[in-house]
């Protein structure tokens, strides 16, 4: 099998085994288990906790002692076994710990799959910048395929979503062991301090006012990144409690509607070079932040029919802009404003602030707010008010970022993005 096809399969399965449950998990939690909103927020924190701790640790292992593809396979086996156990758990506290173990296995595989692809492509003299993006797009398509399978098999509220993910994770683990060897590179000096090995030396960047401000805003925006993954599907499913909407396509196939967001991602990735060249890094970040305002506001006024359905679809379309534009322009900002010696660690810090600390703040905060302020006595959630609150939060972040974050656009930065 040719190498590009093999890496395409790797990318597809990498995100398939996550997409099978991530978007529909809330339906299982609130609908089938009927557990609380505050506890749901705490369980979703596991993604952030694992994103902070595990990638650095597995990076050191792959750099020093073990082939990356073997470590990757072992991690996915651990992920599969943990997912198989999840449905047996009958209380939220134990569920938190089991999910934390599952995420400790899964989250580092995202960066590890990229490392494996880069290693194999470079070793076989491929142009990574040209060849890798089309391979990575198949990861998003894998995520979409998993969402569709979970919904179309009527498993969006059942434990089977975890079994589907686990089965494909076993396939991926076995497949990983057949990949070309990705030997340890020993890029980290043996005499490096523990802080250097873990990428913590990047924290000294907080001594730079502009970078510190950027990382703080990254954390606050990161708090918004997972909110629609957490609540989007269950929000659409809850329209089924109204007899007028119970038989609507939106209620029955809510996951398919949510997958428009992922299709949008693939489209807006292609638009990024144009927007960066036309508007510059800061303005593209601002466009992303305002897109989050629209993402939440459209949900607040959406419903399964007519104009309301149009708003829900628009919300899913602007998601691609909201998600991609900040991640890419933020990464480019780090790339063009940090010293090359610390650049990898700085990129790690950017991801840590958004997907780590930001995700923890967003998961816990939204869980507490929804449970204590916007849940009725019968358990129904005040979705209109919830989405308006999130939209207001995103708007405040956007305005403050526009005022306080100063960054002069340099066209050369955009040129760097294309090479």
Image (cartoon, rainbow, N blue to C red):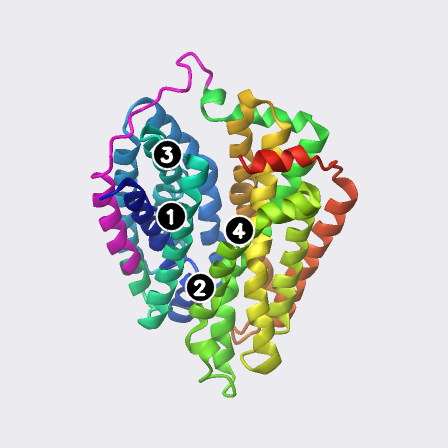
Q: Is residue 351 at least partly visible in the picture?
A: yes
Quadrant containing the N terminus is top left
Residue linked to disc 1: 97
- Distance from the alpha carbon under mark 3 to that under mark 1: 42 Å
For marks 2 and 4, the one nearer the N-term is 2
Residue linked to disc 3: 126
Q: Nearer the viewer, mark 2 or mark 3?
A: 3
Instruction: Tell me the quarter of the picture where residue 73 sits.
Output: top left
Give above or below for 50 relative to 379.
above
**Residue shown at 64%/52% (left/top)?**
288
Q: Nearer the viewer, mark 1 or mark 2?
A: 2
Residue linked to disc 4: 270
Do callouts 2 and 3 mark residues in contact (Cβ within 8 Å)? no
Give above or below for 170 relative to 247.
above
Q: Which mark is residue 26?
A: 2
Residue density around tag 3, few if under 14, some if 14–19, many if 20 or more, within 10 Å: some
Do callouts 3 and 4 mark residues in contact (Cβ within 8 Å)? no
Pick out the residue farthest to the right. Answer: 403
For marks 3 and 4, the one nearer the N-term is 3
Do callouts 3 and 1 mark residues in contact (Cβ within 8 Å)? no
**Residue shown at 55%/70% (left/top)?**
313
Give above or below for 287 relative to 299.
above
Q: Horizontal and vertical percent for residue 63?
A: 36, 25
Residue density around tag 4, few if under 14, some if 14–19, many if 20 or more, within 10 Å: few
In this picture, residue 363 sits left or right of residue 288: left
Q: Nearer the viewer, mark 2 or mark 4?
A: 4
Boundaries of the magenta span? 164-193
For marks 1 and 4, the one nearer the N-term is 1
């Amino acid at each position: 099998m040719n190498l590009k096809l093999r890496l395409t399969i790797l990318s597809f399965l990498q995100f398939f085994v996550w997409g099978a449950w991530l978007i529909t998990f809330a339906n299982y939690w609130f609908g089938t288990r009927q557990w609380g909103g505050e506890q749901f927020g705490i369980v979703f924190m596991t993604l952030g906790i694992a994103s902070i701790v595990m990638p650095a640790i597995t990076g050191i292992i792959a750099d020093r002692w073990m082939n990356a593809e073997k470590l990757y396979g072992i991690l996915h086996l651990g992920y599969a076994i943990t997912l198989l156990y999840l449905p047996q758990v009958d209380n939220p506290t134990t569920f938190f710990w089991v999910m934390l173990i599952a995420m400790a296995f899964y989250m580092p595989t995202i960066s590890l799959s990229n490392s494996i692809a880069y290693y194999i492509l470079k070793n076989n003299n491929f142009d990574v910048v040209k060849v890798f993006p089309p391979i990575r797009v198949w990861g998003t398509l894998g995520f979409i395929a998993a969402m569709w399978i979970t919904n179309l098999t009527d498993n969006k509220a059942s434990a089977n979503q975890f079994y589907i993910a686990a089965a494909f994770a076993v396939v991926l683990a076995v497949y990983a062991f057949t990949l070309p060897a990705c030997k340890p590179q020993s890029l980290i000096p043996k005499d490096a301090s523990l802080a250097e090995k873990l990428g913590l030396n990047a924290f000294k960047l907080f001594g730079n006012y502009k970078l510190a401000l950027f990382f703080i805003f990254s954390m606050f925006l990161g708090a918004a990144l997972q909110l629609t993954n957490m609540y989007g599907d269950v929000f659409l499913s809850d329209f089924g409690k109204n007899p007028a909407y119970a038989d609507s396509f939106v209620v029955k196939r809510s996951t398919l509607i949510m997958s428009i967001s992922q299709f949008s991602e693939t489209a807006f990735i292609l638009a990024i070079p144009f927007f960066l060249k036309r508007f510059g890094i800061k303005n593209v970040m601002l466009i992303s932040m305002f897109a989050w305002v629209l993402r939440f506001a459209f949900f607040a006024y959406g419903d399964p029919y007519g104009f309301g359905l149009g708003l829900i679809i628009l919300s899913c379309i602007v998601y691609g802009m909201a998600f991609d534009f900040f991640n890419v322009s933020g990464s480019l900002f780090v790339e063009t404003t940090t010293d090359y010696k610390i650049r990898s660690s700085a990129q790690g810090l950017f991801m840590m602030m958004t997907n780590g600390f930001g995700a923890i703040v967003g998961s816990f905060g939204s869980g507490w707010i929804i449970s204590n302020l916007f849940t009725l006595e019968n358990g129904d959630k005040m979705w209109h008010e919830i989405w308006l609150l999130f939209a207001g939060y995103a708007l405040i972040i956007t305005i403050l970022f526009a005022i306080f974050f100063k960054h002069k656009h340099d066209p050369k930065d955009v040129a760097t993005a294309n090479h």
